[in-house]
């Protein structure tokens, strides 16, 4: 079957709107992400926690499905690393928690660009600070 690739921007079909829960195999088919990758992402993204039934099978809700689509977009289409995608999702949740659980309402390109620059600067600051701590012991030998 030749299916189109689905991203977080595609509107849910009528069948998707009428459903409350999806199995991992259904989510895998809808998002074009293999089940073992979905299970791995659950370990890497704390916000992706599908409910489990009595038998232990995963039951993905609509918010979980949208989150999987968002993660897929960040990793596969935009080239984020796992760490970068985690950071972005956390930032989106903090920036616009009222819009929806994923913060997908951030459409302003300036906001996204400036946020990325800020994250990078903070990361560089941490690295520089850590590097200074490593070099300081040489200062103690003067004296």
Image (cartoon, rainbow, N blue to C red):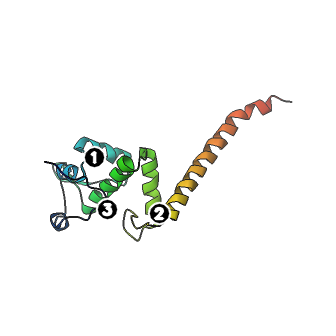
* Closer to the camera in the image, 69 or 53: 69
Q: Which residue is mark 2?
A: 94
Q: Which residue occupies the extreme right position in the image?
A: 143
Q: Name the foreground residue: 71 vs 136.
A: 71
The reply to whether residue 45 is in sight is no
Q: Please, is residue 129 above or below residue 74 in the view?
A: above
Q: CA distance from mark 3 to mark 1?
A: 19 Å
Where residue 40 sits, quadrant-wise, is top left
The label nearer to you, 3 versus 1, is 3
The residue at the point 42 percent across, 67 percent down is 97
Residue 9: image tag: 3
What residue sits 79% from the left and 32% below the top?
140
Q: Which residue is mark 1?
A: 38
Q: Is residue 13 visible?
A: yes
Q: Residue 132 sits in which quadrant?
A: top right
Give the class, few, some or many, for how many residues have Cα within 10 Å of label 3's Cα (few <14, many ≥20).
Answer: few
Of mark 2 and mark 1, the one earlier in the sequence is 1
**Which quarter of the rendering shows the C terminus?**
top right
Label 1's element?
helix
- Disc 2 on helix, strand or loop? helix
Q: Of label 2 and label 3, which has the lower sequence position?
A: 3
At horizontal 45% and vertical 55% (from top left) the residue drawn is 88
Please report contact status of discs 3 and 1: CB closer than 8 Å, yes or no.
Answer: no
Q: Position of residue 63 (x, y in %)?
A: 29, 62
């Amino acid at each position: 079957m030749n299916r189109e690739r689905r991203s977080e921007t595609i509107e849910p079909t009528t069948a998707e709107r009428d459903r409350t829960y999806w199995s991992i195999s259904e989510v895998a088919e809808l998002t074009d992400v293999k089940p073992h990758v979905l299970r791995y992402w659950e370990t890497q993204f704390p916000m992706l926690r599908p409910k489990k039934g009595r038998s232990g099978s995963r039951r993905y809700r609509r918010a979980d499905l949208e989150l999987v689509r968002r993660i897929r977009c960040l990793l596969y289409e935009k080239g984020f690393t796992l760490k970068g995608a985690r950071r972005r999702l956390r930032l989106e949740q903090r920036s616009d928690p009222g819009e929806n659980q994923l913060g997908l309402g951030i459409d302003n390109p300036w906001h996204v660009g400036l946020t990325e620059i800020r994250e990078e600067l903070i990361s560089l600051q941490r690295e520089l600070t850590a590097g200074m701590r490593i070099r300081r012991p040489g200062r103690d030998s003067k004296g």
